[in-house]
Amino acid sequence: MTNRVEFTAGISLESAHSVLEKKNCCEKLHGHSWAVTARWAAVNPTDQGLFEHRLSNLENTVSDLDHGNLNDIEGVKENMATAEAVAELIFKRLSAINAGSCLVSVQVEEEPDCSISYFGNIEKK
Ligand SMILES: [Zn+2]
C-alpha cells in the first residue's frame, strides 16, 4: 500500500521591509506581521517525528527574518524584499534540509487575504 500524506507548518514573523521599485507607500520602511506556511508531502513516511522535524526546520529557517529588516537579509535582492522574494528565499532554505519529504510550497501572507505561494522553479531541466 502506498500512502501519501501532506502536512503544513506555520509561523508568524514581525519584520520590516521597503520595496523601492514600487514607487508608492511601499517604498517607505514599514512593518508587517507576516504569516509563513510551508507545505510538505511524503509517501509512506517512516519517521514518526517528521512533522515535528519540519516545524523545527521552519522555525530555524526563518529565525533571522524575525524582528529585523528583510532588506538586510542575504539572498533578498536589495530594496526588493517583496513577499514573493521572501517566499522564494524560505523555499530555497527549506529545500536544502528536506530529507524524507517533498517540499510542495511556501506561502507568505503580507496582509490578511493577501498572500503568495511559491512552488519552486518548475522549468524542465
Ligand atoms: Zn509591505
Image (cartoon, rainbow, N blue to C red):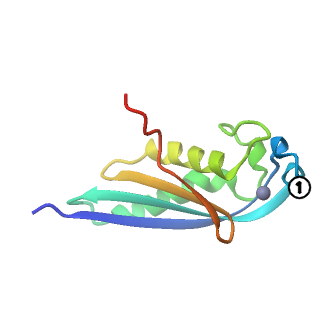
* In-image side of 56 versus 41 (left or right): right
Q: Is residue 42 above or below residue 94?
A: below
How busy is the neighbourhood of tag 1: few (under 14 within 10 Å), some, or many (20 plus)?
few
- Viewer-side residue, 8 vs 64: 8
- Amino acid at circle 1: Cys
Q: Where does residue 50 sit, x and y in percent of width and height? A: 34, 61
The residue depicted at 80 percent of the width and 46 percent of the height is 19
Outermost residue on the left side: it is 1
Q: Where does residue 72 sit, x and y in percent of width and height? A: 77, 42
Outermost residue on the top side: it is 125
The residue depicted at 68 percent of the width and 37 percent of the height is 74
Q: Where does residue 119 sit, x and y in percent of width and height? A: 47, 49
* In-image side of 82 versus 46 (left or right): right
**Image quadrant for the N terminus?**
bottom left
Dot 1 beta carbon under 8 Å from ligand 1: no
Q: Quadrant of ligand 1?
A: bottom right
The residue depicted at 38 percent of the width and 66 percent of the height is 7
- Viewer-side residue, 91 vs 56: 91
- Return the residue at label 1: 25
Q: Where does residue 9 sit, x and y in percent of width and height? A: 48, 66
Q: Is residue 116 above or below residue 27?
A: below
The residue depicted at 82 percent of the width and 41 percent of the height is 21
* In-image side of 71 versus 61 (left or right): right
